[in-house]
Image (cartoon, rainbow, N blue to C red):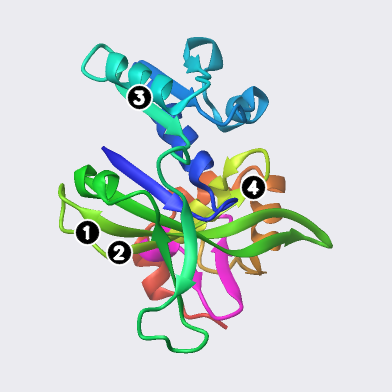
């Protein structure tokens, strides 16, 4: 069992829908327990979920939610999403135990059973809005591994960009992956991108909104970036 917890509008539902999408791509059968009656089929389809093949239940009580989960788990269902478990636990903010002014922490009400039995616990937090010119088009979130019984990854943290109504920003993920592999170069103000796979045609892209717009409007950039080899970057010095 995996627990995603965090404040409202911190990307929990979006991450859960991406898990469903990836499971469906591998031929898995998924169920979505919409406990808050807030499931948006159009957003799910935009993310890539096949809504027609998704089992959706909207229980009217916590008891019905648990009954449905007990029926589905252990059967032919590969992924069961319960959105959300607010019937059982609420995330709130309280003053730290050392009473230090201005220091707050997130705690979950309703006991520790869910956190105890979860194999993986991930905390999401909202960092900042992403803008395209003057319009807010998404948010940046942070996902931290609080508990992991499956791999030694506790306390690792990842930053994710989410576009409103579309899910995880593919262009940002390409940039961060390419930067970590040395395919492109990154400085404090932006990225150095080679769109033509040579050592003399690097383009400097600044900021989150510009990098997304550059990728989305330049069709050859993504395949060129992915095909650009790491040794070329190590031989090239930025101007």
Quarter of the image that includes the N terminus: top left
Q: Are marks 1 and 3 in contact (CB under 8 Å)?
A: no
Q: Is residue 179 magenta?
A: yes
As drawn, which residue projects farthest toward the bottom? 100
> Which of disc 4 and disc 1 is earlier in sequence?
1
Q: Are marks 3 and 2 in contact (CB under 8 Å)?
A: no
Check disc 4 and report the residue beneath it. Answer: 163
The spot of residue 186 in percent (x, y) is: 50, 73
Secondary structure, mark 4, is strand
Residue 141 placement, left or right of 204: left
Q: What separation in Å lies between label 1 and label 4 (alpha carbons)?
A: 27 Å
Check disc 3 and report the residue beneath it. Answer: 66
Q: Is residue 175 magenta?
A: no
Q: What separation in Å lies between label 2 and label 4 (alpha carbons)?
A: 23 Å
Mark drawn on residue 156: 2
Mark drawn on residue 153: 1
Q: What separation in Å lies between label 3 and label 2 (alpha carbons)?
A: 31 Å
């Amino acid at each position: 069992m995996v627990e995603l917890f965090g404040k409202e509008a911190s990307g929990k539902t979006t991450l859960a829908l991406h898990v469903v999408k990836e499971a469906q791509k591998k031929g898995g059968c998924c169920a979505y327990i919409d406990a808050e009656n807030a499931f948006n089929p159009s957003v799910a389809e935009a993310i890539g979920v096949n809504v027609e093949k998704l089992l959706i239940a909207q229980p009217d009580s916590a008891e019905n939610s648990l009954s449905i989960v007990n029926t589905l788990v252990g059967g032919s269902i590969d992924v069961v999403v319960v959105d959300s478990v607010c019937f059982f636990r609420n995330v709130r903010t309280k003053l730290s135990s050392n009473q230090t002014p201005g220091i707050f922490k997130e705690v979950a009400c309703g006991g520790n059973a869910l956190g105890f039995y979860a194999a993986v616990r991930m905390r999401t937090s909202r960092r900042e809005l992403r803008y395209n010119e003057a319009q807010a088009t998404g948010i940046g979130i942070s996902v931290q591994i609080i508990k992991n019984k499956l791999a030694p990854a506790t306390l690792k943290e990842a930053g994710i960009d989410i576009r409103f109504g579309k899910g995880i920003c593919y262009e940002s993920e390409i940039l961060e992956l390419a930067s970590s592999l040395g395919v492109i170069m990154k400085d404090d103000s932006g990225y150095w991108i080679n769109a033509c796979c040579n050592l003399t045609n690097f383009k400097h892209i600044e900021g989150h909104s510009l990098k997304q717009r550059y990728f989305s409007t330049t069709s050859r950039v993504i395949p060129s970036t992915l095909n650009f080899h790491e040794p070329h970057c190590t031989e090239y010095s930025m101007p």
